[in-house]
Every structure is written in structure tokens, then in C-alpha cells.
Image: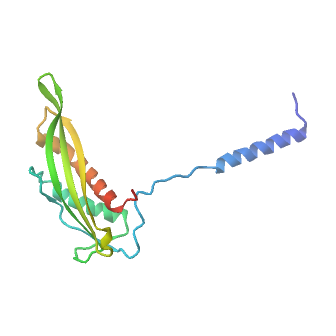
Amino acid sequence: MHLPKKQQLLRFLLSILLLSLFNFATCKYSFNDTSPIPVEVKTFRVNYLENKASYVNPQLSPQLTERVKLKIIGTTRLRQTNDDNADYDISGYVSQYSTSTISISGANSSGNRLTVGFHLIFKNNLDEKKNFEADIMRTFDFDANISLSQAEAGLTTDIVKNLTDDIFNKIFSNW
């Protein structure tokens, strides 16, 4: 069946219009994982994040302290300072570092879980109403056939990354 030229032209134009409409009709959606930082906030200080847990992973505190600083520097416009009058003052400590059995196969343990807790202390020196303390808890599973020190060798990077993200989100997120 052959259509008259007017109908062909009309169909062609309608097709172009629909294609253009769908091409430009896009859905834009994004997560803004940080709240806007007030313009008067310019500096931050991260105090040494101590390890007060009954078991101390000697690598955890220095790596966590440094990683939190780098995350804030790399993600916000804030400038790091070591002054007592920093606008945001961040401190805290590892409060828990313990293992437990999570699965048993026959008479033996087949899986263990490392639980790491962190107590965050945040002080906003420009607005004391925004000061807070929060507890963060993360778990990391590992095979029961390896020792805790062997598990730490593989898990410390993940522990530091996850705790850093949680600390950052507690301080700067919209949630």
C-alpha cells in the first residue's frame, strides 16, 4: 500500500518529532551524599583516632586517622588545620574489636566474624547545637581456618575504608 506524499511527509515529521522528544526527555536523578557545608565553615581538624578496644590492631588507628583526613580534603572544600579553633573538630576512638564464631560445620567452627566499633565525637565550633556523638559498628567475616592476624592482613584495608565512609557520612550526609 502506497501512501500519498502528504501522508508520507506527515509520518516522517511525526517520527522526527517523536524521536526528538524521546531523545531530549531524559530522567535526571542523582544522590547528593553530602549536605551543603555552610559557607562560614572553612576548617577542620581530625584528632588522632585512638584504639581503646580490649584488643588493639596497631595499624588501625594511624590508618583510620589519615584516611578520614584525606577523605575530607578530597571530598569537601574544607581546609585541614591543627589549631584548637578549627570550625569542625573530629575525634573518637575504636571502642570494640572482637571476634565471634558465626558458623559451625560438624564439631568445628567454619566461619568467624570480626566486629569493629567506633565512637565518633563531632564538635561544630561555630554552632554547638550541631555537636554530636555517635557509635558506628561494622562486621567483617573470615574463614575460621585462618588466625585473626592472618584475617587482619586481608581485612584492614576494608575496615579502614568502611569506617572512614561511615564517619564521613555521619558528619556530612543528608541522611
In the rendered structure, the answer to whether residue 7 lies left or right of residue 120 reads right
Q: How many labels does the image show?
A: 0
Residue 79 visible (yes or no): no
| Image point (19%, 39%), residue name | 113
- The image quadrant of residue 142 is top left
Residue 42 visible (yes or no): yes
Which residue, as the protein is rendered here, is positioned at the far top? 106
Whether 86 is drawn above or below 172: the answer is below
Whether 132 is drawn above or below 25: the answer is below
| Image point (16%, 57%), residue name | 61
In the rendered structure, the answer to whether residue 29 lies left or right of residue 142 reads right
Residue 51 vs residue 155, the one in the foreground? 51
Q: Where is residue 38 in the image (x, y as percent from the top left)?
A: 40, 71
| Image point (64%, 50%), residue name | 25
Q: Quadrant of the N terminus?
A: top right
> What is the image's colouring?
rainbow
Which residue, as the protein is rendered here, is positioned at the far front? 129
Whether 174 is drawn above or below 41: the answer is above
In the rendered structure, the answer to whether residue 165 lies left or right of residue 37 reads left
In the rendered structure, the answer to whether residue 9 lies left or right of residue 165 reads right
- The image quadrant of residue 114 is top left
Q: Quadrant of the C terminus?
A: bottom left
Q: Position of residue 172 (x, y in %)?
A: 35, 62
Q: Position of residue 62 (x, y in %)?
A: 17, 59
Residue 121 vs residue 140, the one in the foreground? 121
Q: Position of residue 31 (x, y in %)?
A: 46, 54
